[in-house]
Image: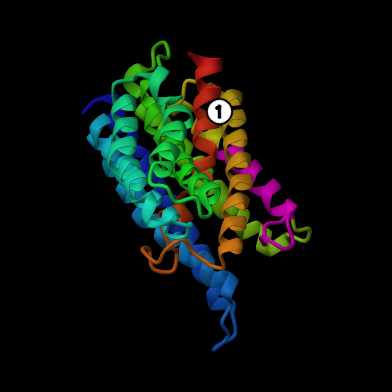
């Protein structure tokens, strides 16, 4: 067993320990409620913690399988997320070919480029070439009804579900001195600080939050976000040993990723509110779909990738 595998196992057991503690806190708070009283905030918190048990297990297995396991996990995640996103968008029969190209050509090619480490391609393939190609395919079908909305929504789906998500495994392609064999641990770092920051933002926001950021859009509060970001920074500092960033660098990177992720989740909340839905899908009981679970990571991933590439490679 090499050092990276040992660290992944240590992280997995540590994550399970944290989840056990969060579960214990939730059960204690539930026990203090009056019999028969239903607390929706506590119920949602407990549901999120329960879903995290499964997420930690899946991500941990993928990390243990190495580069190929991580690539496969996030490629499948992109496919599921793209399907969820496009289900809520405007489509016509004229878009069928462009949609098929998006799922079965653009998505696989993006991950192939990431797998080979061709950053000159995977950083521009979707925002340039797919953005230009797919509207042409739809236009050739001759249907102009709501054309701009149809095209823009498909492009946004590819950006969010494929381009942004693919920047998580792209972290393994970065050339950082003395860290090449441990790059997979940066994925664990990113996912943990963003998701745990999100969970703690939800907890503190419902307990002490008073000032809503976007009152007509989301229950997120400034107090909750501040506590969530600070919590993510502390977690990042504790996890600095698995990164090439050092103590203060890890705290700063965790804070930036967590803040961007939380603000990005407001974008998804706006889209769901405009479409009149609560969740992107019902794939995960009580927690919606893949996009619901990864909304913060989706926005944080490209920023985290480029900050790492600019400052540490």
Spot occupied by residue 67 in the image (x, y as percentages of width and height): 27, 30
Spot occupied by residue 66 in the image (x, y as percentages of width and height): 26, 32
Q: Residue furthest right?
A: 211
In the rendered image, the quadrant that contains the N terminus is: top left
Identify which residue, 112 or 146, lies in the foreground.
Answer: 146
Spot occupied by residue 253 in the image (x, y as percentages of width and height): 58, 29
Spot occupied by residue 51 in the image (x, y as percentages of width and height): 40, 60
Question: Overall secondary structure of the magenta stretch?
Answer: helix
Identify which residue, 11 or 254, lies in the foreground.
Answer: 254
Does residue 251 show up magenta in the picture? no
Q: Is residue 142 visible?
A: yes
Q: Residues within 10 Å of mark 1 (few under 14, many from 20)?
A: many
Identify which residue, 105 or 33, lies in the foreground.
Answer: 105
Q: Is residue 273 above or below residue 106?
A: below
Q: Is residue 43 above or below residue 239?
A: below
Residue drawn at (24%, 32%) of the image: 68
Q: What is the span of residues highlighted in magenta in the rendered image?
A: 213-235
Q: Residue furthest left?
A: 1
The quarter holding residue 63 reads top left
Does residue 234 show up magenta in the picture? yes
Pointer 1: what residue? 250
Q: Is residue 153 above or below residue 35?
A: above
Determine whether, in the image, residue 93 is placed left or right of residue 247: left
Residue drawn at (36%, 63%) of the image: 283
Q: Is residue 59 visible?
A: no
Identify which residue, 131 or 166, lies in the foreground.
Answer: 131
Determine whether, in the image, residue 293 is placed left or right of residue 112: right
Residue drawn at (34%, 26%) of the image: 114
């Amino acid at each position: 067993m090499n050092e990276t595998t040992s660290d992944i196992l240590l992280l997995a057991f540590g994550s399970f320990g944290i989840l056990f503690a969060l579960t214990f806190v939730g059960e204690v708070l539930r026990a203090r409620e009056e019999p028969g009283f239903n607390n929706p905030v506590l119920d949602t918190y407990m549901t999120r913690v329960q879903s995290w048990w499964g997420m930690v297990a899946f991500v941990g297995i993928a990390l243990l399988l190495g580069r190929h396991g991580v690539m496969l996990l996030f490629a499948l995640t992109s496919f599921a997320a793209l399907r969820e996103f496009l289900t809520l968008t405007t489509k016509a029969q004229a878009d069928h070919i462009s949609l098929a190209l998006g799922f079965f050509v653009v998505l696989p090619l993006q991950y192939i480029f990431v797998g080979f480490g061709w950053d000159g391609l995977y950083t521009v393939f979707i925002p340039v070439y797919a953005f230009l190609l797919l509207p042409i395919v739809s236009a050739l079908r001759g249907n102009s009804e709501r054309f701009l909305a149809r095209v823009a929504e498909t492009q946004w789906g590819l950006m969010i579900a494929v381009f942004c998500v693919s920047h998580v495994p792209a972290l393994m392609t970065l050339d950082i001195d003395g860290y090449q064999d441990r790059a997979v641990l940066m994925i664990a770092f990113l996912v943990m600080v963003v998701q745990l920051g999100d969970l703690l933002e939800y907890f503190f926001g419902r307990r002490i939050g008073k000032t809503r950021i976007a009152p007509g859009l989301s229950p997120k509060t400034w107090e909750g976000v501040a506590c969530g970001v600070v919590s993510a920074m502390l977690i990042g500092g504790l996890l600095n040993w698995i990164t090439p960033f050092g103590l203060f660098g890890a705290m700063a990177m965790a804070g930036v990723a967590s803040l961007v992720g939380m603000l990005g989740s407001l974008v998804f909340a706006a889209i769901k509110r405009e479409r009149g839905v609560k969740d992107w899908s019902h794939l995960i009981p009580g927690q919606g779909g893949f996009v619901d679970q990864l909304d913060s990571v989706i926005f944080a991933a490209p920023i985290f990738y480029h900050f790492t590439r600019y400052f540490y490679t």
